[in-house]
């Protein structure tokens, strides 16, 4: 396999990995400077970037938002459990690394259905001795199964931080995506939080054109949504200030290195 990966996936997982079509998690990894990708992913990522050069800023802004939201949850909000659904490939400052730097006893469950993601997660995402880090082969479209498996590691009687970072576009129908989000949140107790961000085409029309071209490539399509639709995922939750905004504008810090207005919107909401 023409992979840049320095840590090879398990043999059983490798047999399931399709390198004939690009994969969003591997393309995202490429845009973020990772090595867990293949030639087909790099080609697709370069084609996307030719139409919309700002996509690398979108990827960085999404990742930086994720980190800042976890810092808030593990710090100010005092959350000690995290359920990261659709985690993607490991990069720097993964959920457990950020959370356990603040709270070493934090528990984190990663969920993904891609064999390369799971193989590398199990090899590379090692948590603290005090906390726990687990990995579930699970599907976003089956939230009940995700919750059942996560319950082996997390205490669903105590607050949990639910992470949905750039994943709901894999559910093309908006109402279906909202239903999945509601079902996941329904399993969480009062005092839990949702951290969610996703791509839009509000700022740049080229983002939508690049996404349309990608969706026509044979890869699993991804649906960009409007900021109002992204805000709709937080219905019934108490939004943390400043609400649902472009990712660089959500509680920015010195690490923000992207334009303030960008086609990635996110927010954090608390379940009452």
Image (spheres, grey):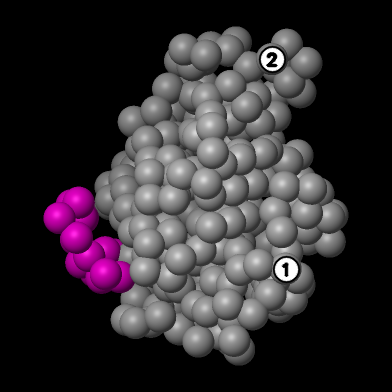
Q: Earlier in the sequence, mark 2 or mark 1?
A: 2
Residue at the spot of label 1: 157
The residue shown at (32%, 81%) is 242
Label 1 CA crowd tier, 10 Å (few <14, some 14–19, many 20+): few
Horizontally, residue 119 falls left or right of residue 55, namely: right
The quarter of the picture where the C terminus appears is bottom right
Label 1, secondary structure: give it. loop
Residue at the spot of label 2: 10
The quarter of the picture where the N terminus appears is top right
Question: Splitting the image into 4 quarters, where does residue 142 fall?
Answer: bottom right
Is residue 71 positioned above or below 133 on the image?
below
Label 2, secondary structure: give it. loop
Horizontally, residue 135 falls left or right of residue 65, namely: right
Could you tell me residue 183's position as x and y percent?
Answer: 76, 72
Horizontally, residue 5 falls left or right of residue 235, namely: left
The reply to whether residue 173 is in sight is no
The residue shown at (59%, 47%) is 108
Q: Residue furthest left?
A: 254
Q: Which residue range is magenta in the image?
A: 248-264
């Amino acid at each position: 396999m023409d992979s840049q990966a320095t840590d090879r996936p398990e043999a059983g997982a490798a047999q399931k990995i399709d390198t004939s079509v690009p994969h969003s998690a591997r393309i995202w990894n490429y845009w973020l400077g990772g090595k867990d990708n293949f030639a087909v992913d790099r080609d697709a990522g370069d084609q996307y970037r030719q139409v919309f050069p700002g996509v690398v800023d979108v990827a960085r802004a999404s990742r930086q938002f994720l980190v800042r939201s976890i810092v808030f949850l593990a710090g100010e909000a005092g959350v000690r459990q995290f359920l990261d659904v659709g985690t993607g490939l490991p990069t720097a400052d993964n959920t457990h690394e950020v959370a356990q730097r603040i709270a070493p006893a934090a528990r984190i469950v990663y969920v993904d259905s891609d064999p390369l993601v799971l193989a590398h997660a199990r090899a590379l995402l090692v948590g603290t001795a005090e906390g726990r880090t687990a990995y579930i082969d699970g599907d976003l479209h089956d939230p009940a199964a995700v919750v059942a498996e996560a319950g082996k590691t997390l205490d669903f009687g105590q607050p949990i931080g639910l992470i949905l970072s750039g994943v709901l576009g894999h559910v093309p129908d908006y109402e279906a995506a909202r239903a999945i989000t509601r079902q996941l949140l329904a399993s969480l107790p009062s005092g839990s939080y949702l951290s969610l961000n996703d791509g839009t085409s509000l700022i740049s029309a080229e983002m939508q054109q690049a996404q349309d071209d990608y969706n026509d490539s044979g890869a699993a399509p991804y649906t960009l949504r409007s900021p109002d639709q992204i805000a709709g995922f937080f219905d019934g939750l108490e939004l943390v200030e400043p609400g649902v905004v472009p990712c660089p504008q959500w509680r920015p810090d010195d690490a923000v290195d992207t334009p303030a207005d960008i086609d990635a919107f996110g927010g954090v909401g608390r379940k009452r």
